[in-house]
Image: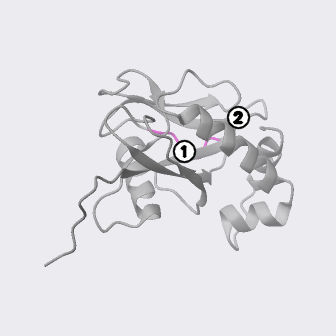
Amino acid sequence: MPHTYDYPRPAVTVDTVLATVGANGDLRVLLIQRARDPFAGAWALPGGFVDQHEDLEVAARREMLEETRVALGPMVQLGAYGTPHRDPRGHTVGVAFLAICGPDEIRGEAGDDAADCRWFAARKPPKLAFDHAVILKDARAEFARLAGSRDDFRRAFCGRRKPQWLEKVRRAAKGGA
């Protein structure tokens, strides 16, 4: 018989901050417009609930693909967010990830429970659902910290490859805090 608990437990969610550099050299992030409640019509980071027996990074990749049709490259775990009432459906603990892509490399397409999908300036996004403004603020700071070292930034997001656009995105991330 599997072990069961007498006490309720929070659900686990994942969110991903996918960033690139805009035409003006600014850091930009891909957001979805929620199609359903809670926060129907509001903008949010792509993400959702972790399935039973699913790895967190696998869940983040799955949710990004379902909601934006974007397959992610290397990712970095940003942190965990578990403030009670961050989700009106119940207590959730969210794990956030960071990823980057080259300018004009990815064009998101709304899917699953997303009504729309667009790039926004990381410094001035629209009002965000849940606690995603807090996550985005932390993401900008972490992108800037990682961008302080060319080698750290490349290792975090590109592994051995060094795409031509990497330095552009690093400079945008460095100034994006």
As drawn, the residue found furthest toward the left would be 1
Q: Is residue 156 magenta?
A: no
Q: Quadrant of residue 75?
A: bottom right
92 horizontally vs 45: left or right: left
Question: Hey, what amino acid is under mark 1?
Answer: Ile
SS of the residue at dot 2? Answer: loop
Q: Which residue ends up furthest to the bottom in the rendered image?
A: 1
Kindly report the distance in space between the C-alpha atoms of the residues bearing marks 2 and 1.
12 Å
Would you say residue 78 is visible in this rendering?
yes
Of residue 106 and residue 148, the one placed in the foreground of this image is 148
Q: Which mark is residue 90?
A: none
Whether residue 97 can be seen here: no
Tell me the element at label 1. Answer: loop
Labels 2 & 1 near each other (Cβ < 8 A): no
Image quadrant for the N terminus? bottom left
> Eyeballing the image, is 33 above or below 49?
above
What kind of secondary structure does the magenta stretch mostly adopt?
loop
Disc number for residue 106: 1
Mark 2 or mark 1: which comes first in sequence?
Answer: 2
User: Where does the image place residue 150, in percent across and percent down from the top left?
Assistant: 84, 61
Residue name at image x 82 percent, y 66 percent: 151
Q: Residue at x 44, y 57 (%)?
A: 61
Kindly indicate the quadrant of the structure image that contains residue 58: bottom left
**x, y percent for residue 121:** 67, 29
Q: How many marks?
A: 2
Q: From this view, report whether residue 14 is shown above or below residue 27.
A: below
Q: Amino acid at mark 2?
A: Gly
Residue 63 place in picture, x, y as percent: 39, 50
From the viewer's perspective, is residue 82 above or below residue 156?
above
Q: Magenta span covers which residues?
A: 103-108
From the image, tell me which residue sits under label 2.
22
